[in-house]
């Protein structure tokens, strides 16, 4: 049975059901135009071993237009996304490392699937069916992205597939009962599919044998310049009239506040750097943008959530999702201590994240859409990224 959820509505909006859905930098080799033509393909190769000898594999998805996506079994991490600019030049538009050692040494969630619960849970605890569960405190006073060893740091099993106009890889992971403090054994999977429509989709599914909470998301850091400069000149649109304000530890206050009249109003295309330096309490709390936006929607299914345009290269990124929220993050904690692919130093605001999700701290916020998954129900979520060029 697929469980159906409701997305919170406020004011004049009605409750909209959702199908249990909740929902760098540059590479060493850049700039060469990839050949077009042919069909979508997927290949696999070795990518090294973890410290305990577990093999890690890499999967390469490629479409008929030469767009290429690479992902590895460690953390279901997307290690590379190569797309063209308006001149046909291909660059890698996600941050990451050239080899496995970088991801093991200082992962920073680059390109990973985070879980069992993406984003923060206040004080590392929640109560479900009268029982309180205690989680790791790994982000100030709170729990972040599933704990000390979340889904981003485990090795998944990968399976490839291809068909007419699409190439895909499915990653599977079994999270045991009690792992990182969460109840229930969770069978999770995520499928990445690259199509000849220049779309990259993330489709998540999970089941459990005990009541638990689930909130999976993809944590790629995007820089549409290919890592040549920061992302402050990127033009951003977010289809959200409201956001969830946070306290000084980045936990939502429980309000759904209007973006109008604040630096968080991206309903019209605005340069990310235009207001990021304003003297605003929310920007001070986040050290920039690190906020969940409540996506405008009138019903279930995929809706457009955000659009990013790099005026210099012409590259565009559109985001659609079944999720009620999207976390917009501007790489505030990148500080120049990480050297990524191609020797590029990742400085502050060198990338942006658009993490489609249920809201942070939902297990402790009864007015937020529920993230509870029970036996007999299936968690489902889908997000689609569309790559393009503005001429």
Image (cartoon, rainbow, N blue to C red):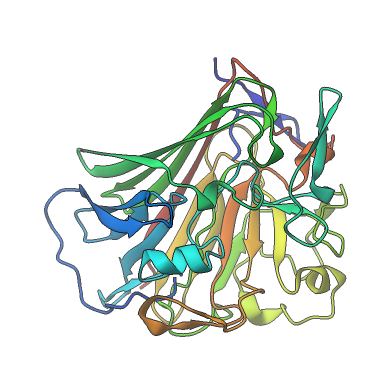
- Expressed as whole percent of the image width and height from the top left, the position of residue 162 reads 22, 39
- Expressed as whole percent of the image width and height from the top left, the position of residue 239 reads 63, 54
Q: Is residue 79 visible?
A: yes
Residue at screen point 80% across, 60% down: 250
Residue at screen point 60% across, 28% down: 20
Choose between 12 and 51: the one closer to the eye. Answer: 51
Residue at screen point 49% across, 37% down: 204
Q: Is residue 367 left or right of residue 138?
A: right
Q: What is the quadrant of residue 21 in the picture?
A: top right
Q: Is residue 268 above or below residue 75?
A: below
- Expressed as whole percent of the image width and height from the top left, the position of residue 308 reads 51, 66
* Quadrant containing the C terminus in the rendered view: bottom left
- Expressed as whole percent of the image width and height from the top left, the position of residue 160 reads 27, 40
Q: What is the quadrant of residue 15 in the picture?
A: top right
Q: Is residue 245 left or right of residue 229?
A: right
Going by the picture, which residue comes out furthest to the front?
Answer: 52
Choose between 167 and 389: the one closer to the eye. Answer: 167
* Quadrant containing the N terminus in the rendered view: top right
Q: What is the quadrant of residue 31 in the picture?
A: bottom left
Choose between 124 and 363: the one closer to the eye. Answer: 124
Q: Is residue 96 visible?
A: no
Residue at screen point 83% across, 39% down: 364
Choose between 283 and 177: the one closer to the eye. Answer: 177
């Amino acid at each position: 049975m697929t469980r159906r959820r409701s997305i919170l509505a406020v004011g004049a909006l009605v409750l909209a059901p959702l199908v249990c859905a909740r929902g760098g930098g540059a590479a060493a080799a850049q700039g060469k135009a990839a050949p077009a033509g042919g069909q979508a393909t997927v290949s696999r190769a070795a990518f090294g071993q973890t410290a305990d000898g577990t093999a890690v594999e890499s999967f390469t998805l490629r479409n008929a237009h030469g767009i290429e996506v690479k992902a590895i079994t460690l953390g279901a991490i997307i290690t590379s996304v190569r797309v063209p600019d308006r001149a046909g030049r291909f660059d890698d538009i996600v941050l990451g490392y050239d080899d496995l050692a970088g991801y093991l040494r200082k992962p920073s969630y680059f390109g990973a699937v985070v879980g069992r619960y993406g984003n923060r849970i206040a004080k590392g605890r929640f109560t479900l069916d009268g029982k309180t569960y205690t989680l790791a405190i790994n982000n100030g006073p709170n729990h972040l992205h599933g704990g000390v060893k979340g889904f981003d740091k485990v090795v998944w099993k990968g399976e490839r597939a291809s068909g007419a106009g699409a190439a895909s890889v499915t990653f599977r992971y079994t999270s045991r009962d009690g792992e990182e403090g969460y109840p229930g054994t969770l069978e999770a999977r995520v499928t990445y599919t690259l199509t000849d429509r220049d779309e990259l989709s993330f489709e998540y599914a999970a089941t459990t044998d005990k009541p638990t909470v689930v909130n999976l998301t993809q944590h790629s850091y995007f820089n549409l310049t290919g890592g040549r400069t920061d992302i402050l000149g990127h033009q951003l649109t977010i289809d959200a009239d409201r956001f969830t304000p946070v306290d000084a530890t980045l936990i939502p206050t429980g309000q759904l506040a209007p973006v109008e009249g604040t630096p968080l109003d991206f309903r019209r295309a605005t340069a990310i750097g235009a207001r990021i330096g304003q003297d605003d309490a929310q920007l001070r709390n986040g050290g920039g943008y690190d906020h969940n936006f409540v996506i405008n929607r009138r019903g279930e299914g995929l809706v457009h959530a955000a659009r990013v345009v790099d005026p210099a290269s012409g590259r565009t990124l559109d985001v659609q999702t079944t999720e009620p929220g999207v976390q917009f993050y501007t790489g505030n904690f990148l500080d120049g201590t990480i050297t990524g692919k191609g020797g590029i130093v990742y400085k502050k605001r060198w990338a942006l994240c658009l993490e489609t999700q249920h809201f942070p701290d939902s297990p402790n916020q009864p007015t937020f859409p529920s993230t509870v998954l029970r036996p007999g129900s299936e968690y489902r979520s889908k997000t689609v990224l569309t790559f393009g060029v503005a001429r």
